[in-house]
Amino acid sequence: MVTVLDPTVEPLPVDAAIADRPGSLAGARLGLLANGKRNSEEMLTAVHDVLADRYEFGTVVERNKFNASRPCPEEIIDELVDLCDVVITSSGD
Amino acid sequence: MQLSSAQMEFDTWHDVVREYIDRGWTDGLPIIPPTPDMVAACLEAAGRNPSEVLGTEPTKGRVITAEKAAVNAVMAGCKPEYFKIVATAVEAMCEPEFNLHAVTASTQGAAMLSIVNGPIAGEVGLNSSVSVFGPGNTANATIGRALRLIVINATGSVSGEIDKATQGHPGKYTWCIAEAEDVSPWGSLQADRGFSPEDSTVSLFAGLSSIQVDNHAFQEPEEILVSFRDAMFAGGAGLNQGEVVVVLCPEHIGNLKRAGWSKGRVKQFLYETAQRPIADWRAAGRLVPDSVGQPEDPLHAVESPDSISVVVAGGLAGAFSCLIPLWGGGSGSRSVTKLIE
């Protein structure tokens, strides 16, 4: 009989929940968060333009985290939470 | 010694190996079954407590204890005396500037190159000479492999899942060397990083696939280094890189030494000569935004002379060196050097 040890590390549980989905985008405060890669802003602009043909947004807030390889800075997250009902992100390249 | 990892029982070692491979807990190769005694031996040799936190993977928040690192080191085939190096390298990889998650997830496919300096390299028998990047040395092979298994099992960066490397390269299996301090006429890497020659250190680099630099034609420094300049144009992001590593072989270093060149002069020469107009970078397929300058403006391959880490390694015969570009343009991840205590 051979006794051996588990080599893996489990992710830490995070106390978080998915935000409520809005019933409609009409009048919503829209956030556009680019990940900093090339064309990420162009991608968001194109998505915004398609949606804007169907919905009249309350406001549109555009941000760019400028570093695709690191998590979004907390201050940008906090700002988007305060200012937006819906946020769309993009990964260009 | 009190260990907290879940224990499993199998009839034979072969059953363990088969099960660990099937669970995706290896690099695809067989492993040494990590028994509690062998794991405890690693921890004792390094003077580490099982519950000691070596680091927390900064993006996913996974905590890597000395025990989990030791389990993976045993699986990789490490002897207990290697674990001091492995544990310190884990501390290095968890430093925020190394950017571990991106390095081990990105399509660019970086590996982790460990360069060991100081007395410990000789004590554990690390190779710095013939076939320095090749097979045959247990310390080189298993220390590098341990770090990869830790990334797989402790951070979850599994190929095809979190690890999305387009191609990757063979250094992702294992990539650890010692510097040939006995051959170098200059201060070694740990001295460049502010440590004493008596200190033992491990330096961790997010290395892309290395580029061989072959120059048997010349003996004068300027004529030798032109081949390194060309490699700098080809490697990684190519332009304005934050860090690259030059690994000089003894024959090349011998010619530089004979001509009286210092390490600083080599770095300055490479910085100054590895430049070309923006238009040429673009013609070579490099993306250079308009904001950087006019097409005729020169652009360097590296940010500064100090962007180039120069180390010495390899066998005495052959004028084969290499250049190792780093992930993320050499600035998305910064190399980390840690004292092995």
Image: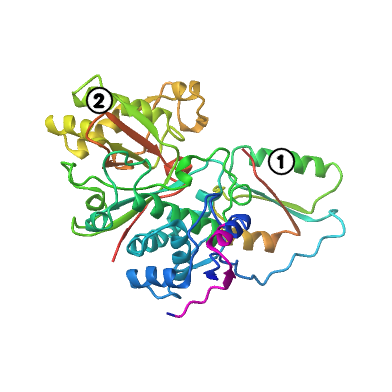
Q: Which of B259 and B237 is in front in this view?
A: B259
In the image, A90: left or right of B156?
A: right
Q: From this viewpoint, is residue B300 visible?
A: no
> Disc 1 is attached to a residue of which chain?
A
Residue B167 rendering spot, x and y as whole percentages: 55, 38
Compared with A75, A37 (above or below) is above
Q: Give the range drawn in magenta.
A: B2-17
Q: Which of B20 and B230 is in front in this view?
A: B20
Residue B9 magenta-highlighted: yes
Residue, disc 2:
B224
Compared with B275, A64 (above or below) is below
Residue A63 magenta-highlighted: no
**Which circle marks residue B326 in the picture?**
none
Amino acid type of the residue tagged 2 in the rendering: Ile
Quarter occupied by residue B208: top left
- Count residues near mark 1 (Cα–Cα under 10 Å), then give few for <14, some for 14-19, many for 20+: some
Quarter occupied by residue A13: bottom right
Residue, disc 1:
A45
Residue B186 rendering spot, x and y as whole percentages: 17, 43
Q: Is the Cβ of the residue at disc 2 closer than 8 Å to that at disc 1?
A: no
Quarter occupied by residue B300: top left
Compared with A5, B158 (above or below) is above
Tell me the quarter of the image containing the N terminus of chain B: bottom left
Amino acid type of the residue tagged 1 in the rendering: Thr
In the image, B27: left or right of B83?
A: right
Q: Share a chain, discs 2 and 1?
A: no
- Under tag 1, what secondary structure? helix
Q: Which of A60 and A72 is in front in this view?
A: A72
